[in-house]
Image (tube, helix red, strand yellow):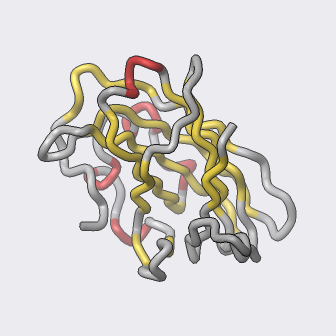
C-alpha cells in the first residue's frame, strides 16, 4: 500500500519526513473499482459529538448540510491554512478494492468523534459520488486504532454543495 502522510498541521511528506506530535490515527480509504472513474478527490472531515450522527443518513448527502459549522474539528492543510475539511488528491493504489492510506496527526485528545470521508466527483459543479462515516470513540496521546473507511458509491451521484471550505 502507498501511504500519503498527513498531519493536522497537515504537512505533506518531504525529504525529512513529517513532524508529528499529539494524538492521531491512520485511515485506509477503501473504494470499489466502479467508483474510481468518477472521483476527483476525497474530502476529510472530523466532527465532534460523533455518537449523535446517523451515519446511514450522513452517507446519503453532503455532510455540510447536516452538521453545524461549530462541530467541525479544525484541520490545517499543507500550506498552514486552517480548514473545516481537507481536500485530498487521489493517490489510490490499484487493486480490488483500491486503497489510499492517510495518517492524521496533531489532533487534540478527546472523545466522541466521527470521521466522514466524502468522495468528490469529477462533475462540474462537483457532486457527492460516495461517502463513509466512521465513529472514533476516543483520541488519546498514545497509539490510536486505525480506521478503515469503506467509501460506498452513490448511484446516481448526489447534487449538493460538497466543498466545506471553498
Q: Is residue 59 left or right of residue 52?
A: left
Q: Is residue 60 left or right of residue 20?
A: left
Q: Is residue 133 left or right of residue 112?
A: left
Residue occupying image coordinates x 67% and y 73%: 106
Q: Is residue 76 left or right of residue 25?
A: left
Quadrant of the frame with the N terminus: top right
User: Residue 36: where, in percent of width, then height?
Assistant: 39, 28
Quadrant of the frame with the C terminus: bottom left
User: Residue 102: where, in percent of width, then height?
Assistant: 62, 51
Judged from this view, the residue extending furthest toward the left is 124
Residue 112 versus residue 148: which sits nearer the camera? 148
Residue occupying image coordinates x 33% and y 26%: 37
Judged from this view, the residue extending furthest toward the front is 15
Quick check: 162 above or below 16? Answer: above
Classify residue 82 by image quadrant: bottom left
User: Residue 63: where, in percent of width, then height?
Assistant: 34, 49
Residue occupying image coordinates x 35% and y 56%: 67
Residue occupying image coordinates x 58% and y 21%: 95
Quick check: 90 above or below 80? Answer: above
Quick check: 139 above or below 78? Answer: above
User: Residue 138: where, in percent of width, then height?
Assistant: 73, 58
Classify residue 28 by image quadrant: top right
Amino acid at each position: 500500500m502507498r501511504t500519503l502522510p498527513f498531519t493536522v498541521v497537515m504537512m505533506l511528506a518531504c525529504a525529512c519526513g513529517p513532524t508529528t506530535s499529539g494524538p492521531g490515527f491512520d485511515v485506509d480509504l477503501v473504494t470499489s473499482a466502479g467508483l474510481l472513474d468518477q472521483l476527483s478527490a476525497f474530502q476529510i472531515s472530523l466532527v465532534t459529538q460523533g455518537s449523535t450522527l446517523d451515519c446511514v443518513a450522513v452517507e446519503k448527502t453532503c455532510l455540510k448540510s447536516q452538521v453545524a459549522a461549530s462541530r467541525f474539528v479544525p484541520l490545517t492543510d499543507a500550506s498552514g491554512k486552517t480548514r473545516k475539511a481537507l481536500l485530498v488528491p487521489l493517490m489510490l493504489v490499484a487493486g480490488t478494492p483500491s486503497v489510499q492510506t492517510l495518517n492524521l496527526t496533531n489532533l487534540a485528545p478527546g472523545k466522541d468523534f466521527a470521521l466522514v470521508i466524502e468522495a468528490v466527483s469529477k462533475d462540474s459543479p462537483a457532486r457527492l459520488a460516495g461517502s463513509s462515516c466512521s465513529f472514533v470513540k476516543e483520541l488519546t496521546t498514545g497509539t490510536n486504532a486505525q480506521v478503515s473507511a469503506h467509501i460506498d458509491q452513490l448511484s446516481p451521484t448526489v447534487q449538493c454543495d460538497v466543498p466545506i471550505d471553498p
